[in-house]
Amino acid sequence: MSDEDTNAGGTDAGGTNGQDTDATGGDARGGDAAGSDGQDAAAAGTDDGGADRQERWTAAWRKAPRALSRSPREPGIGELLEHLAGLDHDPDRPVDLYGDGVVADLERRVAELLGTEDAAFFPTGTMAQQVALRCWAGRTGNPLVALHPLSHPEMWEGGALSAVSGLRTTHPTRERRQPSAEEVRDLPEPFGTLMVELPLRDAGFVLPSWEELEELVEAAREREAVVHFDGARLWETTVHFGRPLPEIAALADSVYVSLYKSLGGLSGAALAGPRGFVEETRVWRHRYGGQVVQQFPQALSALAGLDRELPRLPSYVAQARVVAEALAAGLAEEGVPWFAVHPEVPHTHQFQVWLPYDADVLTEASVRQAEETGTALFRVWSPEGPPGLAMTEVTVTGPGLSWTADDVAAAVADFVSRVGA
């Protein structure tokens, strides 16, 4: 199988398999393969035509030979099974049972990559994070968690921190950016844990500078709080920070990483930190229903992602910056009355594009472009912010590495012509 074939089979998906969705089954954000295959379904709506629209969209993007990234919705079951069968493994090795075997191998690999004493595999990132924050609350004796209001637990976990774990939250800032050290120091109420989402997806996949992150962590230490990183997408932050993964992870007391976002595994997450803490989280994993009898497909696909996708992430970040600049230039050249590419220079291989049109109009233009030209520039658009604005998330992975700035400009011109058609 070529790299492109392998990517289509799951290692280049860069999205979720339902873990990043809200209680309705989708998070309603537009995007490519950025983080939730449920977001397409959410944007399709709940009326009788929603399923038909989703089927049409998926078919259009699956058939389009040119794309910046591939969605986890695109490969069929047969393709995924073929991909799994082609992964490196000993076919005579016994399957895993309640977390041993290949699952234990994966845990050791993650711990080595992050430079931590131990790591535990979890079936979902939501469970991993809930357990981490609950365990820290027990250890600190303080149930208050300081985090951004746009962070994943606040936006997409159905209020589980309070409903399931009995925790409370406080927000250092409501700005669409990472919190500052000063804002953490100024929180009026003592908190036990500071949770930092790196990158902050709903604000545009934004990261602080390395110096700002160090100061933020130090501010929490001054408040005698522990620090937990929501590092679902931590893997691709090394370019922006200019630091290796172990140095980044070493700033926190614990780190959660996704094994399908960016890496393209089937599903799953890992929680890494000190050995005693991780052992405690394994106890709570069982209590939360996460002690699954066999998980070798998830573990094998995650190991493949670590082998194949992780080394390529820096090239995706570099290409995302080329694409973002070309998108902005193309939209300006086409005379679009207002637009935003955010951040202007992406911090990771994912970023937002904002346009002053109805979300349904933009999504239809995206689908028609894929159907009629075989080019999938954008995917689903969602109404965000003030009325009349729509946003989509752009992800650049393996398929997007061949795009030149001229390719992007041509695709933008064609897309804009369809918006006005």
Image (cartoon, helix red, strand yellow):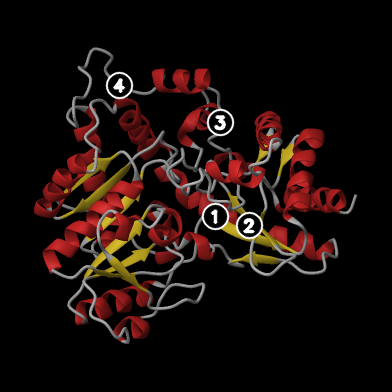
Q: Label 3: which residue?
A: 4
Q: Label 2: which residue?
A: 322
Q: How many angstroms separate mark 3 from mark 4 (CA)?
A: 21 Å
Q: Does residue 234 appear to the left or right of 121 in the view shown?
A: right
Note whether residue 221 is visible.
yes
Q: Label 1: which residue?
A: 350
Foreground of the two, 271 or 404: 271
Decide which of tag 3 and tag 4 comes sooner along the chain. 3
Decide which of tag 4 and tag 1 comes sooner along the chain. 4
Foreground of the two, 195 or 50: 50
Q: Secondary structure at mark 4?
A: loop
Which residue is painted at 48% across and 73% down in the image? Answer: 177
Q: How many angstroms separate mark 1 from mark 3 (CA)?
A: 19 Å
Please rate how many residues cluster around mark 1, counting C-alpha atoms within 10 Å: few if below 14, some from 14 to 19, many from 20. Answer: many
Quarter-of-image position of residue 4: top right
What amino acid type should be assigned to the residue bearing mark 2?
Val
Closer to the camera: disc 1 or disc 2? 1
Which residue is painted at 47% across and 42% down in the image? Answer: 16
Which residue is painted at 36% across and 76% down in the image? Answer: 211
Cβ–Cβ below 8 Å for labels 1 and 3?
no
> For residue 75, which numbered disc appears in the image?
none
Name the spot of residue 148 as percent of width and height, x first. 41, 69
Q: How many angstroms separate mark 1 from mark 2 (CA)?
A: 12 Å
Decide which of tag 1 and tag 3 comes sooner along the chain. 3
